[in-house]
Image (cartoon, grey):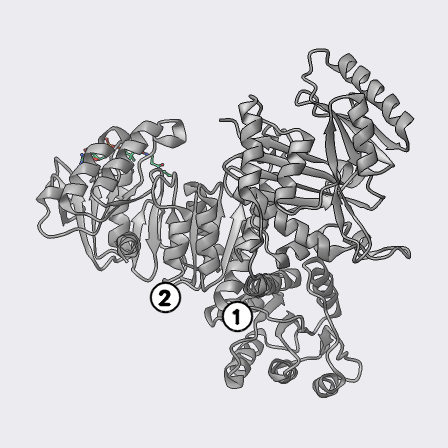
């Protein structure tokens, strides 16, 4: 496809022009040419400079138009004010893409110039990486088209970074950490080529086995999710800047809880993207994901020669969500043959400090090949009676001889220089090795998370449900015609009902007599609430009365509510008083939605009342939410046991609740062009088989 070919020109070009190439050391245009030469780039290099005939020994040209033959891509290192002109020249030359290193565009508010450059490039079907980037580095192409000092240590993961400085720092640290990368791609302002575009390209790059991302903010969240879902290799993301997002003023409860960490976390999970918690974690996890297959089950066996590291690994397994189990008796019996009497064949399998290469290799060989085992972690403490490198080589040999390629192996060596050397050897030979047991377990957890998310995605199924969108839109249109940008509770419930959400019967009375009549229709006891677009917090205004048992109560409540509302806000426009079915008590939960700036309609589920107020025990998903995801939402809040039934209480109707989540998510996607935020709070969940009731509803419309 055309766009892939254009991105080929960015990431594996045969010819590169450097516009702004320079003979003056210290200039970026000097560095880029020097780096292309030093990285031994095999393609053609065309330095472009108006004054020089030769740059660093290579023939230079005044403009790209003067270059004989075609050019795949151009690295732009001229000041911002010249970039538009250069873009046009490149377009005319038929160059397919630009790597614009130059700063001074949207990152400093100069959006207009950036847009002009993108428009110019588009008019010539040219793609732009950047601007405001370090460049592109690729080991397999021997291409350092950047001003980062050198190609990274070679590895199998590729990194896409929104921060140029971080990319440079990571480049150098690949050597000190001994964790290599295949490509480093700086993506900067993402004026054209997005993170999603690079993920899509890298997912078909045979040199890349894991895509790592450093993300500050994605522009098109849905595109990112789509391409990530389709990727056939692991993606790992480190998202920074998770604290500020939620600070934006929000009109709903949900809005105030929908911080970047929560929404990005949900999107990553739904798109099968593994997360990293910090830079070290990104390196460590990317190493495992790039070298090893996913952990497709929970039967992880740990083999160790030290009790201490074994306990640390056990703690880490619990922390990172891997349930450690004992292997079946036959496995334990066999493992006992490779340890002294005082060893332990439980999990961790402790082959003791006496262990040498043979015990390690034979217990590993058996454990790996047994059908019970899904993956193996080998821990080693450097002892005088063992040879770290020999053990490493023995493990590798056993892996090769087993022919098993679908079970992951991670290793941790704790020791000195001999252990370091052995770990380097392991990584060079495709086995992730780490200096601490918890890190090896965390890497294994990444392989497990990847497998889990992918299998969830496979089983999730459809979200098709029958709904009445037209009716919902009509209610919204009527409210807008009335000059409002929020719905009353009654209207909100009508919208919810159009999406088959089980709302409590709520009718509007305009007079005291009508209130009595409607209360009889609904059936006592009833709840009465003020209906006014000017009073959103009804309880605060004394606008809610519950458990009204008879006609006298209705008349009394009608007068009191009206009086309170007027006292609260004299000029409030009062539509009337709602007469509402009084739902029996159930477990209170909250549902809600926001229209997230990055991912669009996103929904929240959590325990209601004090749990949401104080503990913020909520979870998010980008809508639509499938049944499988809805069920997981119910299970992943801290208060999940309350829904499961605690202290003798019957389990709640989770099936009905999951269905409501699915319907709700369908509603917010369908009405995304109209709705900005919603809350259903409280929603009452009854015992199994008895369903769910939405007791209160709030819909805030998009400002138009
Ligand atoms: N075509 C070709 N070459 C041109 C040109 C044109 N239209 N216009 C100018 N040049 C040449 C200059 O003559 C100069 O070469 P020289 O050294 O032989 O004189 C070279 O291009 C560079 O121009 P100069 O004016 O010296 O700019 P500079 O090197 O000081 O700065 C940038 C240019 C792009 C590096 C700078 O503007 C910039 O954006 N720096 C920030 C880069 C960055 O940090 N990126 C993001 C990292 S996260």
| Rendering quarter of residue 486 | top right
On screen, residue 163 versus residue 632, left or right, reads left
Question: Sequence-wise, which precedes: disc 1 or disc 2?
Answer: 2
Looking at the image, residue 47 sits to the left or right of residue 609; the answer is: left
Task: Choose between 552 and 279: the one closer to the eye.
Answer: 552
- Pinpoint residue 361: horizontal percent, then vertical percent: 61, 82
How far apart, in angstroms, are the residues tagged by discs 1 and 2?
A: 16 Å
Quadrant showing the N terminus: bottom left
Q: Is residue 64 above or below residue 340?
A: above
At 56% from the left and 66% from the top, the residue drawn is 433
Residues tagged 1 and 2 counted as in contact (Cβ below 8 A): no
Residue at image location 66% in from the left, 80% down from the top = 372
Ligand 1 falls in quadrant: top left
Q: Quadrant of residue 413?
A: bottom right
Q: Position of residue 46 (x, y in %)?
A: 17, 48
Examine the image and state in which quarter residue 54 appears: top left
Q: Residues within 10 Å of mark 1 (few under 14, many from 20)?
A: many
Badge 2 marks a residue whose secondary structure is loop
Dot 1: element: loop
As drawn, the label of residue 293 is 1
Residue identifier under label 2: 206
**Residue 587 seen:** yes
Q: Position of residue 95 (x, y in %)?
A: 19, 47
């Amino acid at each position: 496809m055309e766009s892939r070919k254009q991105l080929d020109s960015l990431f594996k070009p045969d010819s590169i022009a450097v516009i702004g190439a320079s003979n003056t050391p210290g200039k970026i245009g000097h560095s880029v040419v020097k780096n292309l030469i030093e990285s031994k780039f095999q393609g053609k290099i065309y330095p472009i400079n108006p004054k020089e005939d030769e740059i660093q020994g290579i023939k230079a040209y005044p403009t790209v138009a003067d270059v004989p033959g075609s050019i795949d891509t151009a690295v732009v290192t001229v000041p911002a004010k010249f970039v538009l002109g250069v873009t046009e020249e490149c377009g005319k030359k038929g160059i397919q893409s630009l790597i614009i290193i130059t700063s001074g565009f949207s990152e400093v508010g100069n959006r207009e110039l950036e847009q002009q450059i993108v428009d110019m490039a588009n008019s010539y079907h040219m793609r732009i990486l950047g601007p405001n980037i370090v460049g592109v580095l690729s080991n397999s192409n021997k291409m350092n088209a950047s001003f980062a000092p050198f190609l990274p240590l070679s590895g199998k993961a590729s990194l896409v970074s929104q921060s140029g400085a971080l990319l440079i720092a990571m480049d150098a640290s690949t050597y000190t950490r001994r964790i290599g990368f295949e490509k480093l791609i700086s993506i900067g302002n993402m004026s054209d080529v997005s993170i999603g575009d690079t993920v899509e390209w890298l997912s078909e790059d045979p040199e890349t086995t894991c895509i790592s991302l450093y993300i500050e903010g994605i522009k098109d969240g849905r595109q990112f999710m789509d391409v990530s879902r389709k990727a056939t290799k692991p993606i790992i993301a480190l998202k920074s800047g998770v604290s500020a997002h939620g600070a934006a003023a929000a009109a709903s409860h949900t809005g105030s809880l929908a911080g970047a960490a929560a929404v990005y976390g949900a999107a990553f999970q739904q798109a099968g993207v593994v997360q990293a918690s910090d830079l070290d974690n990104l390196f460590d996890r990317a190493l495992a994901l790039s070298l090893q297959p996913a952990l497709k089950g929970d039967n992880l066996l740990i083999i160790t020669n030290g009790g201490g590291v074994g306990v640390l690994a056990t703690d880490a397994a619990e922390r990172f969500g891997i349930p450690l189990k004992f292997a079946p008796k036959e496995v334990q019996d066999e493992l006992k043959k490779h340890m002294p009497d005082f060893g332990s064949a439980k999990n961790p399998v402790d082959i003791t400090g006496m262990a040498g290469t043979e015990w390690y290799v034979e217990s590993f060989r058996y454990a790996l090949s047994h059908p019970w085992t899904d993956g193996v972690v080998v821990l080693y403490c450097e002892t005088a009676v063992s040879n770290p490198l020999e053990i490493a080589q023995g493990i590798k040999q056993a892996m090769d001889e087993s022919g098993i390629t679908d079970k992951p192996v991670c290793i941790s060596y704790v020791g000195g220089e001999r252990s370091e050397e052995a770990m380097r050897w392991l990584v060079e030979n495709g086995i992730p090795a780490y200096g601490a047991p918890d890190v090896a377990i965390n890497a294994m957890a990444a392989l497990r998370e990847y497998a889990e998310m992918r299998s969830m995605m496979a089983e999730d199924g459809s979200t098709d449900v029958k709904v009445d969108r037209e009716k919902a839109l009509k209610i919204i249109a009527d409210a807008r015609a009335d000059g409002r940008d929020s719905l009353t509770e009654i209207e909100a419930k009508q919208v919810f009902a159009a999406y088959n959400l089980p709302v409590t019967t709520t009718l509007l009375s305009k007079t005291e007599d009508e209130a009595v009549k409607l209360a009889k229709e609904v059936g006592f006891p009833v709840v009465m609430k003020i209906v006014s677009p000017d009073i959103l917090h009804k309880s605060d205004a004394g606008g809610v009365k519950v458990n009204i048992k008879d006609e006298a109560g209705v008349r009394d409540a009608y007068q009191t509510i009206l009086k309170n509302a007027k006292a609260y806000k004299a000029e409030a426009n009062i539509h009337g008083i709602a007469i509402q079915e009084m739902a029996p008590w159930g477990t209170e939960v909250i549902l809600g939605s926001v229209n997230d700036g990055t991912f669009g309609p996103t929904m929240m589920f959590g325990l209601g009342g004090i749990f949401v107020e104080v503990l913020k025990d909520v979870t998010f998903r980008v809508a639509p939410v499938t049944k499988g995801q809805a069920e997981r939402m119910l299970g992943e809040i801290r208060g999940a046991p309350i829904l499961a039934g605690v202290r003798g209480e019957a389990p709640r109707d989770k099936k009905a609740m999951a269905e409501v989540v699915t319907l709700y998510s369908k509603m917010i996607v369908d009405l995304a062009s109209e709705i900005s935020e919603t809350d259903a709070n409280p929603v009452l969940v009854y015992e199994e088989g008895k369903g769910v009731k939405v007791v209160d509803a709030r819909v805030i419309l998009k400002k138009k």
